[in-house]
Amino acid sequence: MDLFDDLPEPTQSAGAAASTVTCQPRCTEDNEEESRGLKRRHRDREESREVGEIKKVCKEGLPVLKGYVAARRGEREEMQDAHVLLPDMTGCVSALPTQVSCVSFFAVFDGHGGARASCFAAENLPHTLGRNFPRGDPENLDKLIKKSLLDTFRHTDEEFLKKASSQKPAWKDGSTATCMLVVDDVVYIANLGDSRAVLCRTEQEEGCAERRSVTLALSKEHNPTIYEERMRIQRAGGTVRDGRVLGVLEVSRSIGDGQYKRCGVISTPDLRRRQLTPNDRFIILACDGLFKVFSADEAVKYVLNVLQDEGVEKKEGLTEEEGRYEAACQRLATEAVRRGCADNVTVILVSVGF
């Protein structure tokens, strides 16, 4: 069956989700042969080192990142979100560049039309990024990291579309993606669609002893109402009706959605880079379910209020600070549903410590 034979009925908004599907990346012990091969090569390199050589560890002065996740089905019948938390991604990378000490990866995937595209992306994208990651001693590391992200998104989309078109009937699923790759103290955000990433940073106000928190956008939304997105869709022969591609698809960039690729929907992510500083508190990655009922500033302030709440119950196995971040993440997702968001809500809260 041709993937482009027919178009889905406009029954469900793109970028929606609904039950707790946690799709783990293929970097764990039970994974496929290629992943095991990466592990064997990594282990062989470790064993070949001379006795007494000190294993490479994160350099002093680099941020310590801890991730917390909360997922709510909302009023959907199915959970179509997926997420990845890899505070230490080195097990997915075949060989780190010599100047790199630590690599972390966090991502939210908001599926529509089903959970297959989001789950496929969560399982495969980190693994592909690990294969594409720069190695050796490159002079233009920043450029190579950006290229690896672009190549990874393209490959993930191509592989899913290949799998989707081979099914009978062909899968129509699609997914947004907001991914955060942290290389030492530099954050790279790669995103497609309307999931978002925001950073909370504290700043010293001039003439004031107190510090204030500011919200910094780390991602760019892609929807058909944006001029550049609409022009691309129209040049490809597509149309935008009621703010949607062909009056159906709510996002203009995604993984999957093969039936819309001929209409100008692409899988090229927007890339942004920012260096972390000791003034940074945390980063929120979340699907549009959160931001339908919270502005970015409101979400940051809500988390800050929970972090300052002395009444947060201490959880076994967590420090007091970790317990507060965990509570903030869970409460933020719950509050989004309470405010009337009928969509799936997935929130990743990443604390930044120096």
Image: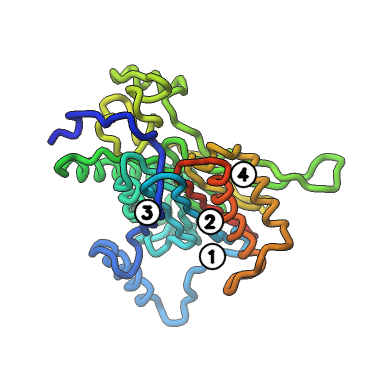
> Helix, strand, or loop for circle 4?
helix
Q: Indicate left or right for 232 with 211 as reference.
A: left
How many residues crowd around disc 4 within 10 Å: few (fewer than 14), some, or many (20 or more)?
many
> Helix, strand, or loop for circle 1?
loop
> Helix, strand, or loop for circle 3?
helix
Circles 4 and 3, Cβ within 8 Å, touching? The answer is no
Relative to the observer, which residue lies in front, 14 or 132?
A: 14
Task: Measure how far apart labels 1 and 3 are at the Cα level.
Answer: 20 Å
139 relative to 326, above or below = above
> Mark 2 or 3 closer to N-term?
3
Write the residue at 54% across / 65% down.
58
> Mark 4 or 1 closer to N-term?
1
**In the drawing, what numbered circle is on residue 58?**
1
Circles 1 and 2, Cβ within 8 Å, touching? The answer is yes
> Helix, strand, or loop for circle 2?
loop
Where is mark 3, residue-wise? 126
Question: Residue 345: percent from the left, percent from the top?
Answer: 48, 47
Where is mark 4, residue-wise? 299
Q: Residue furthest bottom?
A: 51
Report whether residue 140 is seen.
no
Residue type at the position of mark 2: Asp
Where is mark 2, residue-wise? 184
**Which of label 4 and label 1 is nearer to you?**
4
Circles 2 and 3, Cβ within 8 Å, touching? The answer is no
Residue type at the position of mark 4: Ala
